[in-house]
Image (spheres, helix red, strand yellow):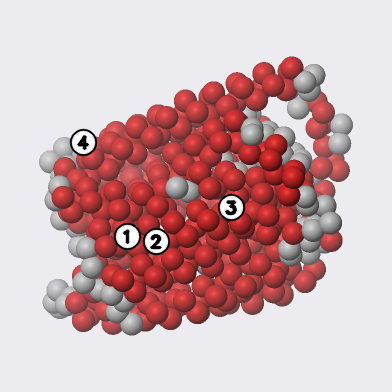
Amino acid sequence: MNHQHANGDSASEPIKASLWLLWPIIIAGEAIFLLPFILPRLFRPSILEAWQISNLELGFAFSAYGLVAMICYGLGGPLADRFSPRLLMCSALISTAIGGLAMLRTPSPTVLCWLYAYFGMTTILLFWAAMLRVTHNLGGSQQQGTAFGILDAGRGLFAAVMATFMTLLFAQLLPKDALPTSADLLSALTWIVSIAITMVGLAAFLVAIAFRSLPKSQDPTAAKNFEWRSVSPLIRRPAMWLHGLIVLCAYCGYKSIDNYGIFAVDVYHATDVQASQLTTLAFWARPFAAIAAGLVADRLSHFKSLAALFLVTALGNAALIFVSPVSMPWFGLLMIAVTTAAAVYGLRGIYFAVFDDLRIPATLVGTAAGIISLVGFLPDVFFGPLTGYLLDSYPGRPGHQYVFGFVCLLSAIGMIAAIWNGKHLMASRHQDGIPA
């Protein structure tokens, strides 16, 4: 855009000068979700058997997380605009690690729901908006897609490395000459949870050390600049809520990746180790997809890039509706799953790179992130119980077909919303006399 080119060199200075500061954000940004989400994504069939819970009961735990998170998104945004990210993020990581100790014992469905509600507070109220705000500040005005692409790519690389390590260790901890019993699975999972807790604690230490040198301009302790009355105009913007819908559709696609492992077990009769290997392979698509999406989006258009990625996601989920061992060999399933996951990870890499497109004041980025997240992450409330119900009520392939069909529909809606919002914002800029 012409109005950005004039100061393009200065705009890129923050990310060039402080690029290394993205690495503690990257590690912390994924480590904090190891316990509530990455472990169930990797070892879902084993967790269900070892803890003696159903898909629906695990879905209720995710719902408890989502209900608390909805409140925390609204409160966490203004917190991020008022307090230091170092304080908020370290507190979040330490409290999440402490909560993970409950997973070392076999949690009952009730305990699991309370634990996930607690995780909803620690990971969202104190962490989420603070992470997005400091990333936005480091990105400058010219490289939002790149900054957020690097964030999600780095998070994906960290997740893939951890997933590979934990999957290999998990396989080594299980007996080689017999099918694992529930006790075998529980013992192996205890080791995995212990490692995850340790990583979360180490991430807190890393943030505490690295953020000591955070430039004052990137440390938004901006209580003197933040005013509650400035939130009202944000809430009244239709583009904000429409972008919340875009994030919601993309997030449902992301959460559907959790079902790849159980799909492989139910439909392809894969072993628990093969299922975790499939999910791990999908994890490896994330770093490449996110950074590529960020680089392309900064050079073309954020909203056109979102629409294109939604199209690939819709086609991928449509393909998953029809695949079976008869029609598609295991390698074909891997290719479809990885391609679809890559499109979803691309969406995640850029859907928070639009704050400048939405014309959000720098002092309100955390609040805007909270408002968008309030809508965008509603799937944390309903997606787990809905998919759990479908998988338990329609065992085998039919339940998975319903899930993938639902995600395919949402991806089509997301594509339409991205196109609509992009055109609306472009027209608004022209009306205000701002060069495109």
**Nearer-N-terminus badge (3/1):** 1
Q: Position of residue 297 (x, y in %)?
A: 61, 35
Task: Give the residue type that dot 4 points to.
Answer: Phe
Question: Which of the labelled discs sits on residue 64, or is there none?
Answer: 2
Q: CA distance from mark 3 to mark 1?
A: 22 Å
Q: Quadrant of the C terminus?
A: top right
Q: Position of residue 335 (x, y in %)?
A: 33, 43
Q: Are marks 4 and 3 in contact (CB under 8 Å)?
A: no
How packed mark 3 is, by other alpha carbons closer than 10 Å (few <14, some 14-19, many 20 or more), is: many
Q: Which residue is mark 1?
A: 60
Q: Which residue is mark 4?
A: 322
Q: Residue at x 44, y 39 (%)?
A: 249
Q: From the viewer's perspective, is 75 left or right of 196? A: right
Q: Position of residue 419 (x, y in %)?
A: 53, 24
Mark 3 residue element: helix
Q: Residue at x 40, y 29 (%)?
A: 412
How packed mark 2 is, by other alpha carbons closer than 10 Å (few <14, some 14-19, many 20 or more), is: many
Up/down of 295 relative to 435, above or below: below
Q: Position of residue 77 (x, y in %)?
A: 64, 54
Q: From the viewer's perspective, is 58 left or right of 342? A: left
How packed mark 1 is, by other alpha carbons closer than 10 Å (few <14, some 14-19, many 20 or more), is: many
